[in-house]
Image (tube, rainbow, N blue to C red):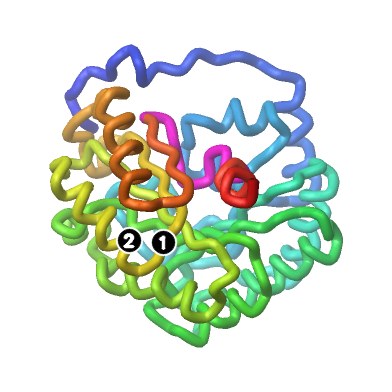
Amino acid sequence: MSTLKKPEWMKVSYRDNPNLKFVRDVLMDLKLNTICDEAMCPNFLECFSKKTATFMILGVNCTRNCRFCNVTNSEPQRVDPDEPARIAEGVHKLGLQYVVITSVTRDDLPDGGAAHFAATIRAIHERNPDTAVEVLIPDFLGDGDALKTVTDAGPEVISHNMETVKTLYDQVRPQAIYERSLELLRSIKALAPGIRSKTGIMVGLGETPRQVEAIMDDLRAVGCEFLTIGQYLAPTAAHYPVQEYVTPEQFERYGALAREKGFEFVASHPFVRSSYNAAEALAEETA
């Protein structure tokens, strides 16, 4: 764990809310997982209080071991064919107009879990025809057919997180490839121009402002439209240490720069995560 002292702007006070129990009860009753819990997201209280959550499919054990992530690296679990229907029912019970679906990385599956993503998208749309779906997908090891399986299911937004700048990939996410992730984002627009493309990055890992600008340029070059920027927080002492707590003022500068470069929606703040207030991006873009 980083020895850096957490600044005041990174401290969150606990505020109970009756909706918190309601959301947890729905998740427990339907045996659903959320990335909110698994990744120790700092926004889970706010999101749960608004009766929203980011569902995580395909189990809770990941086949990769990124140094920034709190999701467990362990033997993957059996794919549950009933999960898409339960997710759709959870969306209905929570009354969600916008839902985010993500997953652990499943390099053990021939399609990386793409068919399960597609089944979940279709189940949500069938049960909740007025609900917009965003999927936050892994890189599928660069498999274009797997990505097409997802685009053919018709989500409104497809997100794939770059996570960090190119020079830090070997240290932070050694099982990923910077160019492969960029190519996936490019392919989203090639396969389905009407689907919005999105990515998220973390700062505070040791990157420089110039490197952050460089990844923005790379993302715009492949047509990425929505961008989130948030502060990296090390989940445990065993994870990659925080190198810097980036100031709110610097986040504002990053946000302004991204908008200047042509991103249609930008969320840049210490507490921003890729799915935080995700509905705002689509609402702002379509307004």
Mark 1 near mark 2, Cβ–Cβ under 8 Å? Answer: yes
| Location of residue 225 in the rendering, given as x and y in whole percent from the top left corner | 45, 57
Amino acid type assigned to the residue bearing label 1 in the image? Cys
Please tell me which residue is depicted at 50% across the width and 64% down the height of the picture: 137
The quarter holding residue 250 reads top left
| Location of residue 183 in the rendering, given as x and y in whole percent from the top left corner | 35, 74
| Above/below status of 146 relative to 104 | below
Q: Taking 16 as reference, is 11 left or right?
A: left
Q: Earlier in the sequence, mark 1 or mark 2?
A: 2
| Above/below status of 74 relative to 281 | below
Please tell me which residue is depicted at 70% across the width and 66% down the height of the picture: 121
Residue 271 drawn in magenta:
yes
Look at mark 1 in the image and give the residue it sits on: 224
Q: Is residue 235 visible?
A: no
Label 1 to label 2: alpha-carbon separation: 5 Å
The quarter holding residue 101 reads bottom right
In the image shown, does 203 or 280 lie closer to the viewer? 280
Q: Main secondary structure of the magenta part?
A: loop
Q: Taking 176 as reference, is 132 left or right?
A: right
Q: Taking 230 as reference, is 175 left or right?
A: left
In the image shown, does 64 or 97 lie closer to the viewer? 97
Dot 1, crowdedness within 10 Å: few (<14), some or many (≥20)?
many
Query: Where, quadrant-wise, is the N terminus in this rendering?
Result: top left
Dot 2, crowdedness within 10 Å: few (<14), some or many (≥20)?
many
Q: Write the start and end of the magenta stretch as one range.
A: 270-279
| Location of residue 240 in the rendering, given as x and y in whole percent from the top left corner | 23, 43
Amino acid type assigned to the residue bearing label 2 in the image? Leu
Secondary structure beneath disc 1? loop
| Location of residue 96 in the rendering, given as x and y in whole percent from the top left corner | 76, 44
Secondary structure beneath disc 2? helix
Look at mark 2 in the image and give the residue it sits on: 219
Q: Is residue 158 visible?
A: yes
